[in-house]
Structure formats: structure tokens, C-alpha cells
Image (cartoon, helix red, strand yellow):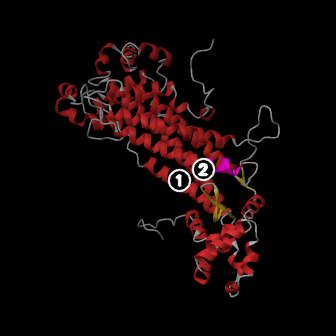
């Protein structure tokens, strides 16, 4: 029997997109965090830099990857050894000490607590994942902006509560998707992903005892060595870095889910306004071409909010100066949320690039109500002429099957009106075209003084 490793068999969304949050990546991040602490001690003058770099070499520091990589620590071995202490750092320290000279071992994990290393490692993992998610979102945004511009004035049926409402355009619908992704990207870029260095109970007493006055600079130097943000406060039980990250990731899957949800709806056989490339086959129905990418994205959007909620529960129950279980519950929750956002953003970029419009289907759907999609406009124009009750009666007759244009033509009060224009959906688009133009026109490049030229 194969090992109990999640290879994505039941999570096709994430296959090929979760290496950044794998167990191996987490081990790399844990070692990198420990190495950052060694380098921080060197940066404050407590340890010769040459000694710190000797330790770095022993732990497999890769300057090109900017992480410890060829350290030789097996994730499975570390996982098994970590059960007794409830976290992987306890055996990690033992493994790392074995890889350096005896006189260097005092600098391994010097003054730190396990939570310092795990929290910092998870922020390192998150940073790599978020950077990749942003690249995928940018690709999706570029594709959707081009799609919106191309279909700027393709008039379509707008729907509210599933029913036809008023005309919109395919381009404006895409601008809605685009706006959601852009806001998600902005929130991800605004995240603070900090290092953690508080010592046993957040007082940093061990660092002061070991380093004296120089220890005051240690948290900042640790963050710099790790490549993470430096924050003054200890966040052992103030879990805002985790909840803010979780919320930003969920906003990302929300935006991607909205996009994918519209694609699945508009790809239905009886609508068929959108298509997304070759699609996926059915195991029994050869005629089917399923919108698989959109379906997989939706699966992430359905799961992510509950994961973010779990992070908030953990934050609320992070009692005392070190949490008793709430902290532990964060680890797999946050990683799964990162994993879902990685897969959803990758599939979102692919879906955006593959998206196609069937203009004939769009026009056919627009005409299904035989002009009633303009009932709001008709009401706005006619109510001052014939009153609310007569307008409602006229619309009701059209809804019952009579021809709206014929009813209007027979109405004496409508004689002065340009009825073809009144019933032309292209004349009732509000500011749709302007909004598409605004959303798809690149911002002017700043001039030499930083102002738009």
C-alpha cells in the first residue's frame, strides 16, 4: 500500500500547483528560519559572520533560491519525530545540531521558542505562495482586460435573481470579474508578513539574558535575515498576521469563484453564451465538454471561507501567552487555504485566457423576452404620459404573449416617440461602455517627477 501522502487525488484543483506549500517546502522554511536566527546573532555582533556562514553551508543554504534547501532533513522523519513534542521544531533543532561542529551548537535555536520558528516558517511559505498567486492573478487580469475591451459593446441580457432584468454588455460583465481580481491583488500586496521572535512567553527575556543590550536589535535583524517584515510586537497570541492573510486569500478565491460561477452558468447548454476551450470529457457521455477549470475554481471558493473562519476561531481562542491547541490548528488550515488559492489562481489565469463568446447565442438570449428586457425603460418613458396603472397593464399584456412593439404602436400617446430607438437595447446601457473603457485603458505612465503625464 502506498504511503498516506496527499498527492491531490481528491483535490484536482491543486495538482501541480501546491509544491510551494508541500511538507518539503515547510521543512525548508523551518531550516531557513533557524538560519535567520543564527545570522541575526551575527548581525548584532554576538557571533562572527564567518561562523554564521559556516553554519549556513552546513544546513544547505542556497543563495539562488534564498532558502536552506539541501539540508538533508526528511519531512517524514521530522513529522514522526515531532509527534512527541507536538511540533516539528523540537526534533528539528536536534537534527540541525548534528550538522554543525560542537562549538557551534550553542547558536542553534539560541533563545528562541518553537512558536518563533514555526510562525516565521509559515510566513516564509506564505510569502512564496502569495508572490506566485499574484503572478497568476496578474495574468488573469491581463486576459480579462483584453476580453472586456474586445466585447465592450456586445449587448447581453443582464440577470437579477436569475431572471432577465435590463441589457448589459459582455464587456461590462467581464469588468466586474476584473475588478474583483484587482481588489484581491491589491489586498494581497498590502499584507504584512512578519517574522516572529518573542522567546518563551513573549518577553524576549532569553535574548536579553544572552545578548544584553545588543538583543534589542535582534528581532529586526532576524526579520531582515528571513526576508520578512519586522514588527515591534510579539504576535504569539495576537494572530492578526494569520487572519489577515486568510481573509486576503479568501477574498481572492471569492473573486475567482464569482468569475467561475458566471462561466459555468453561461456555459450551460441552453444558454451557451460562453465557452472555455476544449473543456473536459465525461466518462460516459461523449457529447459533453465540461467547463472543468471553472468547476475546480468553484470548489476552492466553496471551501476557502470555512478555512478562514477556522483561523478566526483559532485567533479568538489563542489564550494566555502561548495557545493550547488553537495555534496547532492553524497550521494545516492556513496551508490548505494557501493551497486552494494557488490552484484557483492558476486555473483562473488559464480560464481567462481560454474564454470565448458565442455572439449569436448572446443575441438569441437577449431576444427571448421579445423586448420585455426594456420594460424598465418603457415604464420610465411612458409613465409621465399615461400613468403607472396603464403602463403596468401594458407590460402585463406583453408578458402574457402580446407583442410589445405592436402595443406601443397602437398607443396614441406614444405616437411622438421613436419606438425603434426606445426598444433598441443598445440605447439603454447607461454608463456601461464608459466603465469598460475606464477599466481597460492602461493608466498613464508617471513622468520623471512621479506624476501621470
Q: Residue furthest right?
A: 286
| Image vertical order of residue 423 relative to residue 296, above or below | below
Q: Nearer the viewer, residue 397 or 275?
A: 397
Identity of the residue drawn at 67% across and 66% down = 373
Identity of the residue drawn at 57% across and 49% down = 258
Label 1 environment density (alpha carbons within 10 Å; few <14, some 14–19, many ≥20): many
Mark 2 sits on what residue? 259
> Disc 2 vs disc 1: Cβ atoms closer than 8 Å?
yes
Mark 1 sits on what residue? 180
Residue 403: x and y in percent read 76, 71
Residue 375: x and y in percent read 65, 70
| Image vertical order of residue 1 relative to residue 302, above or below | above
Quadrant where the N terminus sits is top right
| Image vertical order of residue 219 relative to residue 57, above or below | below
Which secondary structure, mark 1? helix
Is residue 50 in view?
no
Identity of the residue drawn at 68% across and 71% down = 425
Residue 193: x and y in percent read 38, 40
Dominant secondary-structure state across the stretch colored magenta: helix
Label 2 environment density (alpha carbons within 10 Å; few <14, some 14–19, many ≥20): many
Amino acid at each position: 500500500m502506498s504511503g498516506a501522502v496527499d498527492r491531490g487525488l481528491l483535490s484536482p484543483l491543486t495538482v501541480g500547483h501546491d509544491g510551494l506549500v508541500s511538507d518539503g517546502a515547510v521543512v525548508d522554511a523551518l531550516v531557513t528560519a533557524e538560519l535567520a536566527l543564527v545570522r541575526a546573532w551575527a548581525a548584532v555582533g554576538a557571533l562572527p559572520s564567518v561562523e554564521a556562514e559556516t553554519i549556513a553551508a552546513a544546513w544547505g543554504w542556497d543563495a539562488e533560491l534564498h532558502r536552506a534547501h539541501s539540508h538533508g532533513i526528511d519531512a517524514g522523519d521530522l513529522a514522526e519525530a515531532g509527534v512527541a513534542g507536538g511540533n516539528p521544531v523540537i526534533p528539528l533543532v536536534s537534527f540541525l545540531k548534528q550538522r554543525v561542529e560542537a562549538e557551534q551548537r550553542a547558536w542553534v535555536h539560541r533563545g528562541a521558542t518553537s512558536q518563533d520558528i514555526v510562525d516565521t516558517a509559515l510566513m516564509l511559505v506564505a510569502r512564496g505562495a502569495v508572490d506566485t498567486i499574484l503572478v497568476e492573478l496578474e495574468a488573469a487580469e491581463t486576459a480579462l482586460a483584453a476580453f472586456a475591451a474586445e466585447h465592450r459593446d456586445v449587448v447581453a441580457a443582464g440577470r437579477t435573481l436569475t431572471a432577465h432584468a435590463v441589457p448589459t454588455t459582455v464587456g461590462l460583465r467581464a469588468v466586474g470579474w476584473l475588478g474583483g481580481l484587482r481588489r484581491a491583488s491589491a489586498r494581497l500586496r498590502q499584507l504584512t508578513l512578519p517574522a516572529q521572535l518573542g522567546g518563551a512567553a513573549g518577553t524576549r527575556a532569553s535574548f536579553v539574558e544572552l545578548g544584553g543590550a545588543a538583543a534589542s536589535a535582534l528581532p529586526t535583524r532576524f526579520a531582515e535575515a528571513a526576508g520578512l517584515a519586522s514588527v515591534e510586537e510579539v504576535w504569539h497570541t495576537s494572530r492578526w498576521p494569520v487572519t489577515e492573510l486568510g481573509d486576503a486569500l479568501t477574498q481572492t478565491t471569492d473573486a475567482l469563484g464569482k468569475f467561475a460561477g458566471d462561466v459555468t452558468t453561461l456555459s450551460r447548454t441552453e444558454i451557451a453564451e460562453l465557452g472555455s476551450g476544449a473543456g473536459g470529457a465525461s466518462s460516459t457521455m461523449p457529447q459533453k465538454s465540461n467547463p472543468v477549470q471553472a468547476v475546480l475554481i468553484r470548489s476552492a471558493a466553496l471551501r476557502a471561507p470555512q478555512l478562514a473562519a477556522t483561523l478566526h476561531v483559532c485567533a479568538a481562542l489563542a489564550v494566555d501567552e502561548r495557545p493550547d491547541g488553537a495555534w496547532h490548528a492553524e497550521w494545516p488550515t492556513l496551508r490548505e487555504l494557501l493551497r486552494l488559492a494557488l490552484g484557483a489562481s492558476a486555473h483562473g489565469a488559464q480560464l481567462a485566457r481560454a474564454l470565448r463568446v458565442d455572439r449569436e447565442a448572446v443575441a438569441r438570449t437577449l431576444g427571448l423576452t421579445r423586448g420585455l428586457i426594456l420594460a424598465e425603460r418603457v415604464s420610465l418613458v411612458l409613465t409621465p404620459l399615461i400613468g403607472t396603472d396603464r403602463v403596468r397593464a401594458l407590460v402585463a399584456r406583453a408578458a402574457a404573449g402580446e407583442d410589445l412593439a405592436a402595443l406601443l404602436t397602437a398607443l396614441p400617446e406614444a405616437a411622438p416617440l421613436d419606438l425603434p430607438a426606445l426598444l433598441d437595447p443598445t440605447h439603454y446601457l447607461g454608463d456601461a461602455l464608459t466603465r469598460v473603457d475606464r477599466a481597460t485603458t492602461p493608466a498613464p505612465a508617471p513622468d520623471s517627477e512621479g506624476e501621470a503625464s
